[in-house]
Image (spheres, helix red, strand yellow):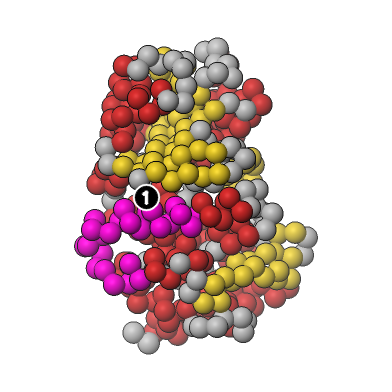
């Protein structure tokens, strides 16, 4: 399956099983033989770097590698500089390119390095996690974390191509699959109730029978939004549904709670806030709760409204005393609300109360 993305730089997203084995021939369509640097983490390196490297070498490319430790803590300024200095020391020029082979951390870090090395060189996204396939590999957002918050330094920099090998999903843990599933549920809440019904009508053990269809629907949603608003000046902000409070959950847990699981909590709390604030056309807490139970998501990690509000106030969506929050009004219908920080904690508290009442009723 090929999906064309028509942003400032047009590119293809290809979704196919065993696509990594065809890396060399695919990339030969985009570049003459040149230097390339595969950037990955230790876990992905053990599984996939060998086949990607061999295919590239067979196609005539000079292959370099940088392997990082896995986890969110890798996405920092020191590792960004490590990439830049390595590229400079090895004589990489604007005709060479990078490959982000891994999950969202590797994709974000590699993309940002590509955006700023020599004022911009090419890179290719090769996401190996479900979350990266349906979220960070599409749309050109790149970033690293600062001690003060997540993704506070970054750039918009579109890839040359995105190659999604669905065979990689077979090596993911249950928790890693859950991270991708919640991102697809988020996409459904934003724009596509039919995607929600895919998960609602199937059992978790049936995931393999509909996962590719779900990926295609999810990527299609993001493509439509990104093409309309590439640099997040308007409608693209809705893709942050669940992220403002989700990032706070991540930060409060010292990133021991993964991005996907934190967003699941943030999405449910946002649904509770929508109901409590009088903005909801339907009670999505009730709609989402059975699905969360079925797929094993937690809506509440026990953080207080004050803790969640404080963690969210360093979010990029804050402007002075106003924080922009994506609010789900109904399935397939969201809006962006500008909320004064003086109301923020109380709204979180009201949303959490609805969730906790729903939990205690079970």
Total labels: the figure holds 1
Q: Is residue 256 visible?
A: no
Name the residue at 35% across, 58% down. 214
Query: Is 220 included in the stretch rendered in magenta?
Result: yes
> What is the quadrant of the C terminus in the image?
bottom left
In this view, the residue in front, 270 or 73, is 270
Q: Is residue 160 left or right of residue 172?
A: right
Query: Is 244 included in the stretch rendered in magenta?
Result: no
Magenta residues (range): 197-222
Q: Residue furthest right?
A: 320
98 up-or-down from 320: above or below: above
In this view, the residue in front, 308 or 279, is 279
Dominant SS type (magenta) = helix
Name the residue at 67% across, 64% down. 324
Q: Position of residue 286 (x, y in %)?
A: 43, 82
Q: Position of residue 173 (x, y in %)?
A: 28, 51
28 up-or-down from 218: above or below: above
86 up-or-down from 116: above or below: above
Which image quadrant for residue 120? top right
> What is the quadrant of the N terminus in the image?
top left
Q: Position of residue 248 (x, y in %)?
A: 56, 60
Name the residue at 34% across, 35% down. 44
- Residue that label 1 marks: 130
Q: Residues within 10 Å of mark 1 (few under 14, many from 20)?
A: many
Q: Position of residue 169 (x, y in %)?
A: 29, 47
In this view, the residue in front, 87 or 23, is 23
Which image quadrant for residue 340? bottom right
In this view, the residue in front, 173 or 12, is 12
Q: Is residue 242 visible?
A: yes
Name the residue at 69% across, 64% down. 323
């Amino acid at each position: 399956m090929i999906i064309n993305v028509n942003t400032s730089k047009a590119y293809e997203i290809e979704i196919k099983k065993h696509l990594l084995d065809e890396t060399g021939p695919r990339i030969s369509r985009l570049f003459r033989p040149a230097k390339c640097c595969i950037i990955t983490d230790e876990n992905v390196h053990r599984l996939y770097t060998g086949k990607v490297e061999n295919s590239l070498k067979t196609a005539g490319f000079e292959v370099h590698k940088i392997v990082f430790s896995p986890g969110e803590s890798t996405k920092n300024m020191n590792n960004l500089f490590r990439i830049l200095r390595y590229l400079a020391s090895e004589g990489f020029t604007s005709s060479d390119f990078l490959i982000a082979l891994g999950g969202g951390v590797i994709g974000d870090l590699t993309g940002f390095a590509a955006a700023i090395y020599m004022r911009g060189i090419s890179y290719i996204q090769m996401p190996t996690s479900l979350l990266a396939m349906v979220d960070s590999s599409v749309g050109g957002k790149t970033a690293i974390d600062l001690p003060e918050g997540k993704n506070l330094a970054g750039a918009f920099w579109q890839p040359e191509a995105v190659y999604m090998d669905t065979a990689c999903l077979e090596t993911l843990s249950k928790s890693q699959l859950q991270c991708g599933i919640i991102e697809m549920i988020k996409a459904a809440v934003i724009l596509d109730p039919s995607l929600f019904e895919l998960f609602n009508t199937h059992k978790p053990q049936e995931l393999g029978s509909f996962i590719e269809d779900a990926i295609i629907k999810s990527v299609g949603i993001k493509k439509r939004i990104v093409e309309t608003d590439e640099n997040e000046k308007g409608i693209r902000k809705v893709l942050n549904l669940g992220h403002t409070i989700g990032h706070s959950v991540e930060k409060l847990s010292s990133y021991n709670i993964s991005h996907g699981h934190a967003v699941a909590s943030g999405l449910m709390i946002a649904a509770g806030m929508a109901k409590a604030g009088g903005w909801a056309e339907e009670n999505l807490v009730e709609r989402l709760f059975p699905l969360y139970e079925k797929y094993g998501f937690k809506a509440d990690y026990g953080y207080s409204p004050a803790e969640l509000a404080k963690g969210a106030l360093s979010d990029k969506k804050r402007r002075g005393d106003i924080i922009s929050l994506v609010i789900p009004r109904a399935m397939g219908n969201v809006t962006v609300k500008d909320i004064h920080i003086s109301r923020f904690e109380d709204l979180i508290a009201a949303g959490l109360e609805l969730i906790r009442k729903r939990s205690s009723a079970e």
